[in-house]
Image: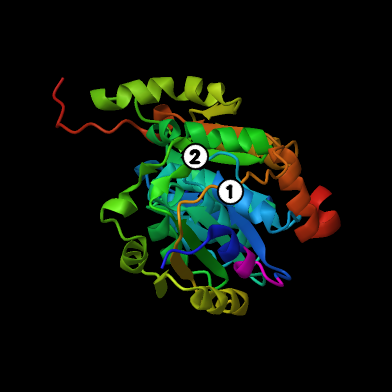
Amino acid sequence: MKLDRRKVVAELLTERGALVVVAGLGACAWDITAAGDTALNFPLWGGMGAAAMVGLGLALAQPRRPVLVITGDGEMLMGMSSLATIAVQRPDNLSIVVLDNEQYGETGHQATHTAMGAELPAIARGCGFDHASTITKMGAVAELRNTIHDRAGLRFAAIKITPADYPKALPPRDGAWLKHRMRVALLGEQAHA
Amino acid sequence: MVAARHWSEEVFALLRKYRADLISYVPDAGHAKLIDRCRADIETRVVPLTTEEEGVALATGAWLGGTRHVMLMQSSGVGNCINMFAMLKTCQVPFLTLVTMRGDFGEFHPWQMPMGQGTPAALGLMDFIVLRADAARDVAPTVEAGLRFAFNSYNRVAVLFGQRLLGAKDFRTVRE
């Protein structure tokens, strides 16, 4: 079954506590903002293909915090080789979740490679991820939310979602400010040291 | 007699001095000694990349979390990074890369020429400060200036190591 993206993200971000979230550009950035914009969100407005590696940088710098990357299938395909790089590092506090609607929603709903055979969880497994799954049920999303918080190992999940468009919930778009907001939240006074 | 320290030892000491705890690289022969030195250090986390854009995104995440990152790459990689460099500029993320040059002084390989000669201009397009070392004695002060520009005054910086420093590889046995 294909799931509703906003319900999926709301479930993943339930009682999020210390969770740091990076969202890939486009709909995923709007999704995490709809669930509640906070200093521990870093919604990308550009840098397509960067989301997973931004997550790796955060996971290595903040090993005690769970770090969650939420991105789209098109964005993940563009940064696909970063899955190999991340698997080599194997941070136990990093989870990468792809909201897979099998299309480029922002640009006119053109089909992505996941609509035509590419299986991102198989690619993640092939790169060395211990945990990689395809999720089609809300119950599994709730389980995933718990394992993310447990920092129970490097994890990849593709959640199949419907291609429905939602009204854009726009986060702040000043990148320097978003960066500083998160650094202050994570580092306190050291952010300016 | 004590052998002179290779410049890569001086660079490594500077990376530690400025607490660049995270080093990523796409391999290059000119960086080989420094990569080995970083890998042997228990305090340095080393991330081999499949392509250079990954290192730009890694630097952004690391800085968000309070860790200083430096990327080692070859000049060809600069061309791969242009769009990702935009993120550094927009988000004002401090960034230092040490770039071994190809397509530079004494180059044999014609296919290396366009990107090598275009490297300073490509970096300039994204407002990098570009520094350059062509002799062993210049490496340490230039890298230290780069570290200061990046992490004290929050710039995007590339230090180019020229082929006069590294030597130009010749694929043939040359008889001239």
Question: In terms of depth relative to the viewer, which is nearer, B175 or A46?
Answer: A46
Span shown in magenta: A10-15
Q: Which mark is residue B59?
A: none
Q: Indicate which disc, 2 or 1, sits on the residue closer to the N terminus.
A: 2
On the image, the x and y values in percent for residue A189 come to 86, 55
On the image, the x and y values in percent for residue B126 come to 57, 26
Using a 10 Å C-alpha cutoff, classify the residue at mark 1 as few (fewer than 14 neighbours), some (14 to 19) or many (20 or more). few
Question: In terms of depth relative to the viewer, which is nearer, A165 or B86?
Answer: A165
Q: Quadrant of the C terminus of chain B?
A: top left
Q: To which quarter of the image does residue A36 belong?
A: bottom right
Report which residue position mark 1 lands on.
A166
Q: Which mark is residue A106?
A: 2
Q: Farthest residue toward the right?
A: A189
Q: What amino acid is at disc 2?
A: Glu
Please identify, in this view, whether the residue under mark 2 or under mark 1 is nearer the observer: 1
On the image, the x and y values in percent for residue B101 come to 41, 31
Which chain contains the residue that carries disc 1?
Answer: A
On the image, the x and y values in percent for residue B32 come to 39, 49
Q: CA distance from mark 2 to mark 1?
A: 11 Å
